[in-house]
């Protein structure tokens, strides 16, 4: 029995003893490995567990590696699962130069982790800005990228299109105007960064992670990469994604509206699957973890022909 399987057993025991997530999180944290890798002078932290094909998890704003804990706890039963702290967040370095957040730099952080893991190939699962990085890794045709899974982040060209043509998306993205302002990091209360979290056990950990993160760096993702007004649709076509792609989207996301999924197939030159979760919001890997895991497992099973009937941390027990 590997350490991941033992972790599942320990977490099931914790769930028997405590109906909340405090005991589950404590057991999960106890078996997480922690590593650091140098990415052209920027130190990137990642947590890892399990053995098998490599899955690389990339969080978004405002989150950190532990935000994937429910997904990791399941998938580590038969995969090597690693979750980064993106640069600017938690235990990773936070360069203050906005140019340090260009897509090529962000993708290089992921490449450094894949190289450190000596896996050769990886499936990348990205949410929000992590999804943005994943899209760019695919458009850059990174040789280590085997499959792409994106949660609640439309293709970058779809974002530009929707901002140009969809008044509802412009309203949904109005908060970005504030984030892009030069001194917005001095005006945004840190307490707001955890307002979306429903689980008090995770929120305590999240608040601690945000307290040692660098908000100015976190907002550089928006300042450097989000389309600036006046919005327009790029005239050139992006490089097509050449790997199998799975998109998972909560249809009740108030920030990334589902219209961003339209016509995405014109930018993907491989198998494309789109799975939507009705009534799910933006943070689906938190609030809809069991559904996300089920979708990911089914898709990976179809891609690899392997078994998706693995021991799950959920074990028919509801996480809160």
Image (cartoon, rainbow, N blue to C red):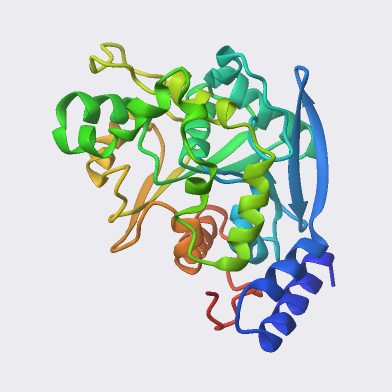
Q: How many labels does the image show?
A: 0
Tell which of 132 and 199 is nearer to you.
199
Report x, y in % for residue 267.
Answer: 34, 29
Q: Residue at left 82%, top 42%?
A: 35
Report x, y in % for residue 292.
Answer: 47, 61
Q: Residue at left 69%, top 40%?
A: 212
Tell which of 219 and 266 is nearer to you.
219
Locate the N terminus and report the quarter of the image it occupies.
Answer: bottom right
State which quadrant residue 13 falls in.
bottom right
In the image, 82: left or right of 210?
right
Report x, y in % for residue 106.
Answer: 60, 25
State which quadrant residue 16 falls in.
bottom right
State which quadrant residue 85 falls in.
top right
Q: Residue at left 55%, top 83%?
A: 316
Report x, y in % for residue 252.
Answer: 28, 56
Q: Is residue 55 visible?
A: no
Vertical order, 211 against 300 (above or below): above
List the single residue furthest toward the bottom.
Answer: 16
Vertical order, 239 against 87 (above or below): above
């Amino acid at each position: 029995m590997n350490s991941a399987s033992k972790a599942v057993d320990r977490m099931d025991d914790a769930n028997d003893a405590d109906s909340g997530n405090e005991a589950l999180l404590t057991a999960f944290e106890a078996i997480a490995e922690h590593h650091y890798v140098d990415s052209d002078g920027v130190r990137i932290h990642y947590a890892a567990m399990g053995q098998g094909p490599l899955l690389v998890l990339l969080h978004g704003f405002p989150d950190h590696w532990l935000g994937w804990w429910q997904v990791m706890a399941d998938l580590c039963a038969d995969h090597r699962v690693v979750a980064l702290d993106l640069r600017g967040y938690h235990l990773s370095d936070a360069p203050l130069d906005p140019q340090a957040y260009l897509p090529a730099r962000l993708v290089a952080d992921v490449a450094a982790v894949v190289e450190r893991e000596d896996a050769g190939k990886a499936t990348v699962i990205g949410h929000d800005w992590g999804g943005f990085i994943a899209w760019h890794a695919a458009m850059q045709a990174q040789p280590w990228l085997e499959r792409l899974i994106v949660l609640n982040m439309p293709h970058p060209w779809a974002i530009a299109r929707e901002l140009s043509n969809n008044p509802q998306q412009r309203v949904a993205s109005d908060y970005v105007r504030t984030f892009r302002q030069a001194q917005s990091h001095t005006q945004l209360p840190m307490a707001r960064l955890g307002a979306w979290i429903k689980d008090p056990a995770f929120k305590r950990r999240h608040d601690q992670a945000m307290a040692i993160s660098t908000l100015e760096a976190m907002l550089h993702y928006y300042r450097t990469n989000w389309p600036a007004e006046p919005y327009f649709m790029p005239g050139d076509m992006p490089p097509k994604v050449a790997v199998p792609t799975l998109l998972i989207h909560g249809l009740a996301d108030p920030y990334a509206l589902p219209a961003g999924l339209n016509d995405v197939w014109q930018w993907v030159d491989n198998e494309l699957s789109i799975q939507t979760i009705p009534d799910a919001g933006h943070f689906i890997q938190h609030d809809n973890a069991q559904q996300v895991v089920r979708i990911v497992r089914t898709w990976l099973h179809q891609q690899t022909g392997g078994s998706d009937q693995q021991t799950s941390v959920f074990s028919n027990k509801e996480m809160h």
